[in-house]
Image (cartoon, rainbow, N blue to C red):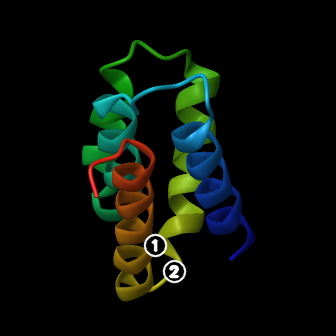
Amino acid sequence: MKPVLCVLLLTLAFSCYEASVLVCPAVLSHVRSLFLDSDSAFSEEIQRYDAPLEAVVANMEVKKCMDQISSNYRRKILSYVVQTEYACNGKI
């Protein structure tokens, strides 16, 4: 559960930081993929960014931890992240 909390807090921090006006759509796509996609689909998502091998391995480790959480909880967490993004970007 600790990795989920870290991801959520980081997402909130980046989304609501005063210097960032909008959250990059690629960040939300990456977070959505992290929470919902299969390992292979998430790996393809990471490779779109030409990430170094170390970053890919680290992201896949986080994905393994996320996959241990039930899909219902992952969907709830993702919905909170999206709601926060909307609130921070003034869409609500």
> Is disc 2 in contact with disc 1, using a CB cutoff of under 8 Å?
yes
Whole-Å distance between the Cαs marked 2 and 1? 11 Å
Residue 60 % position (x, y): 52, 46
Which residue type carries mark 2?
Ile
> Horizontal placement of 1 versus 35: left or right?
right
Is 56 situated above or below 8? above
Q: Mark 2 or mark 1, which has the lower sequence index?
A: 2
**Residue at the location (56% across, 43% down)?**
16
Instruction: Assess disc 1: are there few (<14), some (14-19) or many (≥20) residues with their C-alpha within 10 Å of its C-alpha.
Output: some
Q: Quadrant of residue 73?
A: bottom left
Q: Residue at x 54, y 61 (%)?
A: 64
- Closer-to-camera residue (31/63): 31
Write the residue at 52% across / 25% down. 20
Q: Percent x, y for residue 78?
A: 39, 66
Q: Quadrant of residue 54?
A: top right
Instruction: Tell me if residue 69 comes above or below residue 85 in the rendering.
Output: below
Q: Could you tell me which secondary element the residue under label 1 belongs to?
A: helix
Pick the front one: 90 or 53 = 90
View extreme (right): residue = 2
Percent position of residue 39, x then y: 35, 53
Tally of numbered tags: 2
Q: Nearer the viewer, residue 48 or 76?
A: 76
Quadrant into which the N terminus falls = bottom right
> Residue 69 has which mark?
2
Residue 29 placement, left or right of 60: left
Element at badge 2? loop
* Tag 1 residue: 77
Give the residue drawn at x 35%, y 87%: 72
Amino acid of disc 1: Ile
In the picture, which quadrant includes the C terminus?
Answer: bottom left
